[in-house]
Amino acid sequence: MQNYKSLWLSLAKNFIFAVILIATLMLAMRIFNVEIIFDKVLILSVIATISGVAYLLTIRNPQNYLGFCLGIVSSACLGAQFAFLHGYDLTFLYFAVFIPFQYAAMVNWKKKSLQKADNEVFMPKFLPLKKQIFFFAILLIIIFIDYIFASKILKNNNFLLKIVFATMISSSILANYLMIGKWLDTWLYWLLYSVAAIFSAIIIQNNFNLLLFVFFLIINIITFISWLSQKYADNTY
């Protein structure tokens, strides 16, 4: 297991980098006159972006469970943000599902790391094929259920937005759940989530969220590649 102090140092470095990155982004948007509405939704978006970027950069190292501290902060801010946007299904999801899953992942990663011998590590791996098919079926079922919920309960008549939000919900549920066991498949669902979120930002015309999720897409790709390289370097098949 890596030195505890080094894990905190990595977390701090990634947080500082995220702050500089987002500050630079907002300055660039101001210079190029990109419209930004300064309200409570934007403030939550900024905090969610900084903590979310730092979280993803930190867990590029699949041994650094401390990254989930910032992941929880990011989820709380996004949940509050969607409440202001009346996306109550997403708000419920962030607080009732994502945050508990992220906490469970942090606890499990730490526990597994402590249980391993000094020359062993808790490495990422892919799900067996049957489980991959099972979780993909779960993805489709959740999309269907949320679509019906949005149509009948929330009275949302925007077909495209309902599909996009349902995809965000289903993919992020599975991504957060699979993260607990450090399955590589989690990043496939995070990539799907990021693409769906980009489309949602375009639909609701939120420029900051659009850039936020473009960043998340890029960082998710980088983290996925990082996990893959560590898996095969460790010869864990």
Image: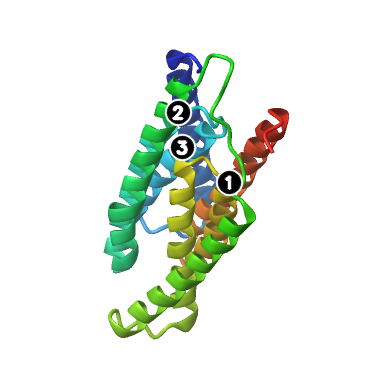
Q: Mark 3: which amino acid?
A: Tyr
Tell me, for residue 220, which label it has, or none: 1
Along the line of sight, the residue nearer the viewer: 65 or 204: 65
The image's mark for residue 193 is: none
- Packing grade of label 2 (10 A; few <14, some 14-19, many >=20) is some
Tell me whether the residue at label 2 lies in contact with that at label 1, contact meaning CB atoms closer than 8 angstroms.
no
Identity of the residue drawn at 48% across and 48% down: 178
Q: How many marks?
A: 3
Q: Amino acid at mark 1?
A: Asn
Quick one: 175 or 42, which is closer to the camera?
A: 175
Q: For the point 60% across and 59% down, which residue is it?
A: 130
Mark 3 or mark 2, whichever is nearer to me: 2
Give the percent coordinates (x, y) of residue 163: 48, 75
Vertical relation: 151 (above or below) 216: below
Side (left or right) of 218 relative to 135: right
Q: Earlier in the sequence, mark 2 or mark 1?
A: 2
Residue 112 circle label: 2
What's the coloring here?
Answer: rainbow
Tell me, yes or no, if residue 44 can be seen here: no
- Image mark for residue 55: 3
